[in-house]
Image: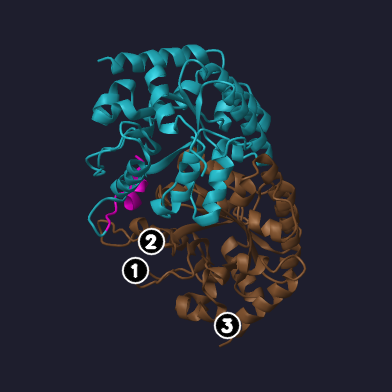
Chain colours: A brown, B cyan
Amino acid sequence: MNQPVTPSFGERARRALDAYGPLCVGIDPHAALLTSWNLPDSAAGAREFGLRAVDAAAGRVGLIKPQVSFFERFGSAGFTALEDVLARARQTELLVIADAKRGDIGTTMDAYAAAWLTPDSPLEADALTVNPFLGVGALDSTFALAQLGGKGVFVLAATSNPEAALVQRSRSAMGESVSSTIIAEVSGHNARVTEAGKWGSVGFVIGATVDWGEAALIAVDPPAAILAPGFGAQGATPADLHERFGSHTPMVIAAESRSILSAGPDALTATIEARVRQYQEVSHV
Amino acid sequence: MNQPVTPSFGERARRALDAYGPLCVGIDPHAALLTSWNLPDSAAGAREFGLRAVDAAAGRVGLIKPQVSFFERFGSAGFTALEDVLARARQTELLVIADAKRGDIGTTMDAYAAAWLTPDSPLEADALTVNPFLGVGALDSTFALAQLGGKGVFVLAATSNPEAALVQRSRSAMGESVSSTIIAEVSGHNARVTEAGKWGSVGFVIGATVDWGEAALIAVDPPAAILAPGFGAQGATPADLHERFGSHTPMVIAAESRSILSAGPDALTATIEARVRQYQEVSHV
């Protein structure tokens, strides 16, 4: 039997948050941002944008989150650009969450997991966001593949966009919300495969502005990283962190994209440093 | 205002089904199939596999469905291979459904739609499968972009894998199953934008072996194409078509992959022709 690579992703995420605080820099080369950076709206522009963002993030934050769709829109050339960005990130200590929200079943899902979570694959990242519409159980072999390579997975659990309610706030025959069921099933997996006292390697995507009461969310236990988009331009501030996440606060990865990237390439490092300080101040309250 | 391209995808899908019957050839270059075809398990192997499948399908069936994950596992090289396969298919009358199951919100989702549904983009297909976990409403601008280019979308509605039940069979506050809510919302969209008597351009993915009663599915109205994986190796036979889909039968796209592709490259055209005849026989019952 192959032994899983150590430290696990869960423990690597915990160390990154301990060392740098919660800020995760999103890398979203959409057309408007490329234009404001004076870069062409092309794969070459997305590559340059991504490389500069990696250089600015390295040593200042623990995690980055490239948004795959903004590379995919350029087809294979976009993926070549993304591979260059991922390769640059691998030369640093940054943990890379590939935000691709893949979701399927069987060998099809396994192929997505192989694409993003296999050591030495061209699109190798440290973790992948996935979509549980086909069931958390359909992701079991993805979890297993991730574990073997010391990789992580973030399962979409609760998002703050109002249209999501009809699916995510629906109730199972047991009366639990879909979001809670997902947290329960993933936590069960983490409990089975994680040493006591360590973080699980399968985390969650939970929007920063989700109302935990209204969404009827259960607690994340054992602990695992919570990727929280919605900080910055989408409305949540560093000062909101405790209020929104309560006892979960130490597990939160606060993803910000536009609020940081719109500073432009020249002000990027200063913007990241200032934002990291803001998070550090509130985390010492 | 730009006028949508005509004929719409809904009408093109109807004509393809009328002309060739329901069979849709899946293009799934996974490792085991490449080996059995004596092709390398590489992007070059996937390219060759895909090109041969397109050539065998053209003029014999109306639709093909490349499974994106089996190209994505090779990174950018895999997408280059897929672009070659898609380009070959565009030289034929085949309708191409890119089975990528993408799902996100806002500009991120728009970027996925742009990648696959923009005329002249490198990954241009005729239709894209999408995931509604973030809400059908989050897909509105994808539907609009598709409509404008005469493209189609297939929304995951009900799958037959047992793990999916916890999400898809959950109930909204109104008591409807998630799957039914998705059908209702998409049908509402189709009704708003489709001329009377024509097919909607946003279809559904509904597994061939889904029990419509148990899944509490409502009827698809106005009509729209139903992409039904699960024929062939996964258990449903051409003779099952009427029994499983009842009055929906004329809308069904019966996707088969392994059952056809495992015949190997030399027997491929004969296998496709035989299978097309089987579907034609049952559709004349």
- Identify the secondary structure beneath mark 1: loop
Q: How many marks?
A: 3
Q: Residues within 10 Å of mark 2 (few under 14, many from 20)?
A: many
Q: Residue at x 53, y 50 (%)?
A: B110
Q: Could you tell me which residue is drawn at 30 percent across and 46 percent down?
A: B184
Per the image, the residue denoted by label 2 is A179
Q: Mark 1 points at which residue?
A: A216
Q: Residues within 10 Å of mark 1 (few under 14, many from 20)?
A: some
Specify whether B248 is left or right of B258: left
From the viewer's perspective, tell me whether residue A101 is left or right of residue B213: right
Label 3 to label 1: alpha-carbon separation: 26 Å
**Which stretch did the figure color magenta?**
B158-172
In the rendering, at what x and y percent does residue A49 appear? 72, 57
The circle drawn on residue A283 is: 3
Residue A170 falls inside the magenta stretch: no
For disc 3, the neighbor class at 10 Å (few under 14, some 14 to 19, many from 20) is: some
Q: Which chain carries label 1?
A: A
Disc on res. A170: none
Residue A269 relative to residue A32: left or right: right
The residue that appears at 49% across and 70% down in the rendered structure is A208
> Mark 3 belongs to which amino acid?
Ser
Distance, label 3 to label 2, CA atoms, is 27 Å
Q: Where is residue B158 in the image (x, y as percent from the top left)?
A: 34, 42
| Amino acid tagged 1 | Ala
Label 2's element? helix
Q: Splitting the image into 4 quarters, where does residue B278 fall?
A: top left
Is residue A91 something one can see in this rendering? Answer: yes
Q: Which of marks 3 and 1 is nearer the N terminus?
A: 1
